[in-house]
Amino acid sequence: MPYTRREFLKIAGIGFVLAGPARIVPAGEKKRKPNIVYIMSDELGYYELSCMGNPRLKTPNVDRLAAGGVRFTQGLAGAPVCAPTRGCLMTGKHAGHTSVRTNPGGTPLREGEETVASVLKRVGYATGGFGKWGCGGRGSTGVPEKHGFDVFVGYYDQVHAHTYYPPYIVRNSEEMPLAGNQGGRSGKTYSHYVIVDEAKKFIRAHKDGPFFCYLPVTPPHGMFDLPEDDPSWALFREKPWPEEAKRYAAMVHMLDRQVGEVIALLKELGLERDTVVFFCGDNGGADYFRDKDHPRGFFGANVHPKTGKAFRGHKGNLYEGGLRIPIVANWPGHIRPGRVSDHLWYFPDVLPTLAELAGAKAPKDVDGISIVPELLGEDAAGRKQAEHEYLYWEYGRQVAVRMGHWKAIRPNPKADWELYDLRTDISEETNVAADHPDVLAKMKAAAEKAHEPVREGVFHNREIHEKDRRAKWGGQRSAGRKTNKMPQDGLIPNKDWKIVRSSSESRFNGKLAKNAVDGDPGTLWHSQFQGGLREHPHELVIDLGKDCEVRGFRYLARQDTGWNGALKDCEFCISAAPKEFGKPVAKAAFKKVKTAQEVTCKPVRGRYVLLRTLSAQDDGPWASVAELGVIGK
Ligand SMILES: [Ca+2]
Ligand SMILES: [Ca+2]
């Protein structure tokens, strides 16, 4: 560990560490339920706390929380990205059982799914959430006020949360206007200040307790913006660092300052000893601001500052770099100060843990195990800490399992399973699968058992959800953005065309196959990525309405800012019947450009066109097309 316990105590300052005398509980008074404050930053890697030795970032308040409580070395994220990890945290389920497994931003929980908030609410807690929800956009079954929160203020959709200056944030599905904002990177009202203020108001209003204050705040994620006059910016603005890195560092410091403000408020209200406070990151470090001098990011989120030993991977994958997060807990008088715990646990354990602290029953179908014995001591808990038989993760095409010190990972369905012994190989460099087939067999069996097909919630009003996403740019950009047109010269008119068949289309967000031939460059076909990812080859069969002479094909890539699924290699076939296609008449290798591209072929007659995709510009498994034209007559 970068710091010994003694060093921790020194950092902390003696006053904070030593708890005062225990509260005397009069006979007959029931044991008071603790308040719970759960703060989660969006991003912030394992080595980005200053108490972990980070030489550039400053987090004195979180350091004090850690020093006055317990810091975990193996408290792991539920998933390597925002929405799925929140789903695990809120529901107590691992990623093979959750309803939120993809990350477009608004994927909903199902109606009636239990969350930490619904469980605590049942035993009398006031429940408030402040920040980024990510478990269901507005207009869906997943909204927080339907899942146990008395109040939730902030962003429901994650794309909305990219800006700190949206024209509005959301409070229990109602819009809460922020004066002087139009989305993007500047404005008059900094959303995060409003969100933290609302959280503090909530704590004050419920000071007689018990309350659950969930703060899944957005810094330091999104566009790296904070007000020019924020005191934390003053500490970093003159640093000789890349501009965005300076802003990131200032946002980390700002967030830490606000953690200090929340602690100070608890102190002011006399609630310090009645409140358990957690602080964590949401997914592994993103290795932001990489350059040739900083191949693992400017702040080394996944690199031990003293030894240089690094976690493999980063946010987005299931190597340790995607799962290791900072996580600390503090409860004066209950959690022994200055501890560093190696207990192996992860986000699904949060629900049963908080439920036990609150004297509530966790739902039967959770995957988590309460860590109360580890937190408070086995004497106080009255039992030994139970361990997981295995921990399970899946994300996109990746699957990983942990059993004790063993870590098994299959990076994609076509790859072999890899096995690492984390005791001796924290960087997952030496695949020992061949040496331990018995261990791997057990872990593969666990993975098979753990995965259930996803069942997502649903939207009943997608328009308000899409509105929130557009609010990232104040709703201006998508309307006013310049799109390239599809040149019409030489094309067969498409007004009588029909889509005969598509192997995959994204119904979740309305990116249907018919959008590829609707004449509107602003609409697009995208293959399915929500609720069952489909991979190449993707196929689209078009009926031209009559027998035509075909001389080539014209393609327009998606016209929004994204590149997901933009075509690279693909082939075209022509046929007189919709089911019988022979050899391709043309093969294309499209470039990464937003203007129209074409491929020609020898004149050939037919009525049906097959597009078969083989790869995409981003090397992902998707396909997307804004417009497809057929040259000929
Ligand atoms: Ca995140
Ligand atoms: Ca279109």
Image: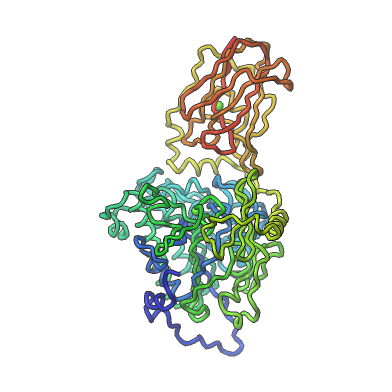
Q: Position of residue 435 (x, y in %)?
A: 65, 58
Residue 570 or 441: which is nearer the viewer? 441
Question: Seen from this angle, which residue lies furthest left?
Answer: 238
Label tally: 0
Q: Quadrant of residue 517?
A: top right
Residue at 60% x, 74% y is 372
The correct choice, above or below, for 241 with respect to 66 in the image is above
Q: Quadrant of residue 506?
A: top right
The correct choice, above or below, for 551 with respect to 508 in the image is above
The correct choice, above or below, for 173 with respect to 479 in the image is below
Residue at 59% x, 36% y is 622
- Quarter of the image for the N terminus: give it: bottom left
Q: Identify the coloring.
A: rainbow
Q: Position of residue 83 (x, y in %)?
A: 56, 52
Residue 494 or 415: which is nearer the viewer? 415
The correct choice, above or below, for 629 with respect to 561 in the image is above
Q: Is residue 323 visible?
A: yes
Residue at 68% x, 49% y is 454
Residue 420 or 562: which is nearer the viewer? 420
Q: Position of residue 529 (x, y in %)?
A: 61, 41
Q: Is residue 492 visible?
A: no
- Quarter of the image for the C terminus: give it: top right
Residue at 66% x, 17% y is 574
Question: Seen from this angle, which residue lies furthest bottom?
Answer: 27
Q: Position of residue 222 (x, y in %)?
A: 43, 49
